[in-house]
Amino acid sequence: MSDEKTIRQPLDFEEYIRAGEPQKRERAYAWRTAIGLQAVDGLTVSDYLKETARRNIEGEITIDEAKKLIKTYYQSKTKREPDDDEKQEADQVSVNITEILNSPSFTFSITGLSGIHRQIFEGTFKFAGQFRQYDITKKEWVLRGDTVLYAPWQDIREALQYDLEQERQFLYDNLTMEQVAEHIAKFVSGIWQIHPFAEGNTRTTAVFTVKYLRSLGFQIGNELFSEHSWYFRNALVRANYQNVQKGITYDYTYINRFFGNLLLGEEHVLRNRYLIIEPNEELKREWEEILADEQTRKTTPATTPATTPATTPATSPASPRNMFWTDNEKILNLIKSIGNHQLSIKEMLAAVGLKDRMNFIDYTLNPAIKEGFVKQLYPDNPHHPRQKYLLTVKGVALLNELENTINTN
């Protein structure tokens, strides 16, 4: 059996992500997110886990084999180190999160949320998948020892049901891309504040968020959740804390900055020290300088174009990383043709003015689905006799942007 001394090389996620092999890239994204999320609870994974992750990314072992290796590794250890309990939790949770992120299945419901917690912490917590049955407080560093007011344990199920149903019925029509990102940030913030689980709440919320964003059409790389997981949690804390006596109100600034980077390709500075309440003069000054610098970069072009650009700023993405945009004219035309309707393939062909069904599917419809702009009405039954196609939330956001551009020109 391998041990921590058999590491062949450092685990370089960027190398796999840059390599361009789709399967390796997706597995690397999942592992990087899973490992990075352990920082939320101050945990780090073992070198053995990193080597196991590398082998899975390379395709040498399956995720099930990876899980068995981690379990056997700790069962067979003859000498326990002082930090083995924490590393064991981090290792087991990381491989479980990776398995979830690599799975296409997702259920937007209370059962789906509790199921994610159960999958993540099965074998780690006896209460995996169960809602807490007592009230909690947590001293927060960014609140200088104060706590967020979490939902009473008796109200957890009802509160979750309300938030999920409100989100399910929410209409994204006529929202700008920025408003879509802010709405999603607020929804995630509300789920986190309910704090359904005694432990592992933030890690569960993060995984649920990634899965939900994918269901909306966003093919996010997840690197922000791995590189800024601690910021993600602290931003949620600030969004759910108020102290009227001290003049502190709920502040979504920081969680909006996180989702702005994640979905809009923005480049906000994400540093935990700027989230501390009642900051000293030095922190205030640093924060004001950062905001001023970001505002300058937002309003000032990086370079002066020598010629008139082919597209106006209103119709081109603020950044190539923008999760809402595509330069594919066929997809843009399809999005405008579908609009707020549900169309069959025959109806879409007529709407875009094409006759070749296979050509349309190969070069327009399938790319639109792959990039997350269009989805099937019956995704679990692709050959449903009444199958229709409609825009995802991502597709609706881009449609809104395109319509706003037309109306302002």
Image: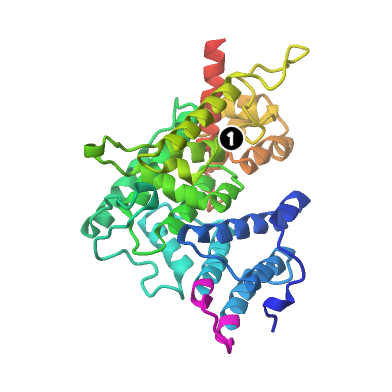
Tell me if 309 is positioned left or right of 228 in this view: right
**Residue count near mark 1 (Cα–Cα under 10 Å), binned few <14, some 14–19, many ≥20:** some
Type of residue at label 1? Glu
- On the question of residue 340 being in view, the answer is no
Residue sitting nearer the eye, 237 or 246: 246
Position of 163 relative to 131 (above/below):
above
Count of marks, rendered view: 1
Please give the range of residues in magenta: 73-87
Asked whether 155 falls inside the magenta stretch, the response is no
Q: What residue appears at the point 52 percent right and 36 percent down from the top-left corner?
A: 260
Q: Picture coordinates of residue 23 (x, y %)?
A: 71, 57
Position of 149 relative to 55 (above/below):
above
Image quadrant holding the N terminus, namely bottom right
Q: What residue appears at the point 55 percent right and 42 percent down from the top-left corner?
A: 217
Residue extending farthest to the top is: 409
Residue sitting nearer the eye, 88 or 181: 88
Tell me if 172 is positioned left or right of 67 in this view: left
Q: Picture coordinates of residue 322 (x, y %)?
A: 61, 34
Residue extending farthest to the front is: 281
Q: Picture coordinates of residue 205 (x, y %)?
A: 43, 54
Tell me if 25 is positioned left or right of 118 in this view: right
Q: Picture coordinates of residue 81 (x, y %)?
A: 55, 80
Which residue is disc 1 drawn over?
267
Position of 70 relative to 250 (above/below):
below
Q: What residue appears at the point 64 percent right and 23 percent down from the top-left corner?
A: 316
